[in-house]
């Protein structure tokens, strides 16, 4: 199988997209997850009005509960899966669309060539 210049450009662009979009999405998801955890924890602490800890520095039940709530909220977030989806799905759609357009153009062109010969 021979690969032409346009296909090589497509392969290079696909690899660049997969690496760039994957890393960007992964880092964004990690950052967003951390911010969400802090926000949930802070909201829990504010709604309970205090609960920083006991005077001896040991956390009280409120801080433990707020920490558990924040952890539970982010437990369903999967940054690797999200990054993989954002990296690979557009590449698959772009290649599929490109080959669909090429197929249709060639199909229409074949129809005109046959009509001229007959």
Image (cartoon, rainbow, N blue to C red):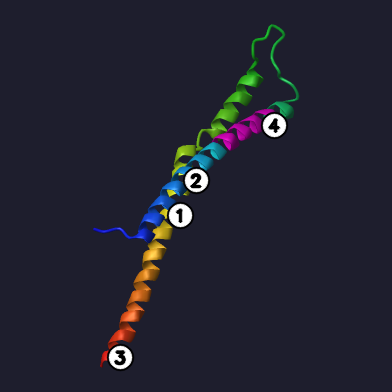
Give coordinates of residue 80: x percent, y percent: 46, 38
Q: Quadrant of the N terminus?
A: bottom left
Outermost residue, front side? 5
**Which mark, residue 116?**
3
Looking at the picture, does residue 18 appear above or below residue 105?
above
Residue, disc 1: 90
Q: Is residue 5 magenta?
A: no
Examine the rendering and report whether any part of residue 85 can be seen.
no
Which residue does the image show at 40% across and 64% down from the upper left?
Answer: 98
Residue contact at pointers 2 and 1, CB within 8 angstroms: yes
Q: Secondary structure at mark 1?
A: helix
Residues at marks 3 and 1, CA–CA distance in whole angstroms: 39 Å
> Does residue 114 appear to the left or right of 70 in the view shown?
left
Outermost residue, bottom side? 118
Residues at marks 2 and 3, CA–CA distance in whole angstroms: 47 Å
Give coordinates of residue 46: x percent, y percent: 73, 28
Crowd around label 2: few <14 · some 14–19 · many ≥20 (10 Å): some
Looking at the picture, does residue 117 appear above or below residue 59?
below
Q: Secondary structure at mark 3?
A: helix
Q: Nearer the viewer, mark 2 or mark 3?
A: 3
Crowd around label 3: few <14 · some 14–19 · many ≥20 (10 Å): few
Crowd around label 4: few <14 · some 14–19 · many ≥20 (10 Å): some
Along the line of sight, the residue nearer the viewer: 19 or 74: 19
Residue, disc 2: 21
Main SS, magenta region, reads helix
Which residue does the image show at 26% across and 59% down from the upper left?
Answer: 2
Residue, disc 4: 43
Q: Which residues are magenta?
A: 30-42
Q: Earlier in the sequence, mark 4 or mark 2?
A: 2
Residues at marks 4 and 1, CA–CA distance in whole angstroms: 37 Å
């Amino acid at each position: 199988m021979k690969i032409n210049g346009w296909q090589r450009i497509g392969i290079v662009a696909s690899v660049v997209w997969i690496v760039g979009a994957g890393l960007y999405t992964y880092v964004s998801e990690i950052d967003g997850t951390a911010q969400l955890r802090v926000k949930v924890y802070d909201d829990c602490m504010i709604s309970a009005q205090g609960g920083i800890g006991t005077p001896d520095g040991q956390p009280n039940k409120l801080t433990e509960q707020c920490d558990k709530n924040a952890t539970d909220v982010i437990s369903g977030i999967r940054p690797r899966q999200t990054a993989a989806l954002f990296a690979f799905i557009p590449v698959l759609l772009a290649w599929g669309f490109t080959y669909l357009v090429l197929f249709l153009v060639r199909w229409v062109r074949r129809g005109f060539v046959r009509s001229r010969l007959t």
